[in-house]
Image (tube, grey):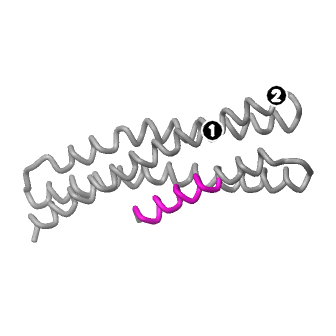
Amino acid sequence: MAAALLTAIILSILGLGASGIFGLMVTAKDDLFRHTSLAIFSTLVNLLAHSMMMFYLIGKGRAVRDAMTEAGLTGDYYQRIAKARVPVFSWGTYAMGMTILTALLGASVDTQVLAGWVHAAAGFVALAVNLVALKLEIDAVVASARAVDEVNRRLA
C-alpha cells in the first residue's frame, strides 16, 4: 500500500510539473486545455494520495499499538511511528493547501482577474512544498516499516 501511495504522489508531482511546463508554453486554446486538464487531474490525484498517506500512517501506528497490547510487548515502536508521521501531517497539509491555492489562482488567471505570474509563482512553490512532503513521507514509510518489522520479529 505504501508503495502505491508513494507512486501516486510521485506521478501527481510529475503531472503538476508537466502541467506547469505546458502552462508556460500556452499560445493557443489547445495548449490551455492540455495545461488545465492535466493540472486538474494531477491535483485530484495529489490531494487523494497525500490524504491517504496520512490515513495509512495512522492505521499503521494503530496496528502496531494493537499488536503490542495483545502480545504484551514493550517498546517504543508506536512512538517511533507517531514521531515519524508528525512532519507528514504538517507538510502534507501544506502541500495540499498550496496545490489547491495554485488551482484557484489558475481559475482567477483564466477569468482575467489575476496576472499569470502569480499563478506560476504559486505553482513553483506548490511543487517545492510537494517535494518536501514527498521526502518526509518516504522517511515516515521507512520508519514505520522498520518498526513493524521489529514488532513482527518479536511476535514470531
Specify few, some or many for label 1: CA neighbours under 10 Å numbering under 14, 14-19, or 20 or more: some
Horizontal relation, residue 141 to residue 123: left or right: left
Dominant secondary-structure state across the stretch colored magenta: helix
* Residue in the picture at 82% in, 28% down: 114
Residue 136: x and y in percent read 39, 45
From mark 2 to mark 1, how far is it between C-alphas? 17 Å
Residue 148: x and y in percent read 22, 60
Horizontal relation, residue 98 to residue 66: left or right: right
- Residue 106 appears in the picture as rendered: yes
Residue marked by disc 2? 114
Residue marked by disc 1? 124
Q: Looking at numbered disc 2 in the image, what kind of residue is underneath it?
A: Leu
Which residues are the magenta region? 2-15
| Residue closest to the eye, 64 or 53 | 53
Query: Along the polypeptide, which appears first: circle 2 or circle 1?
Result: 2
Identify the disc placed on residue 153: none
Up the image or down, 128 lies above or below 154; here it is above
* Residue in the picture at 46% in, 42% down: 132
| Residue closest to the eye, 138 or 93 | 138
Q: Looking at numbered disc 1 in the image, what kind of residue is underneath it?
A: Phe
Up the image or down, 140 lies above or below 100; here it is below
Up the image or down, 152 lies above or below 84; here it is below
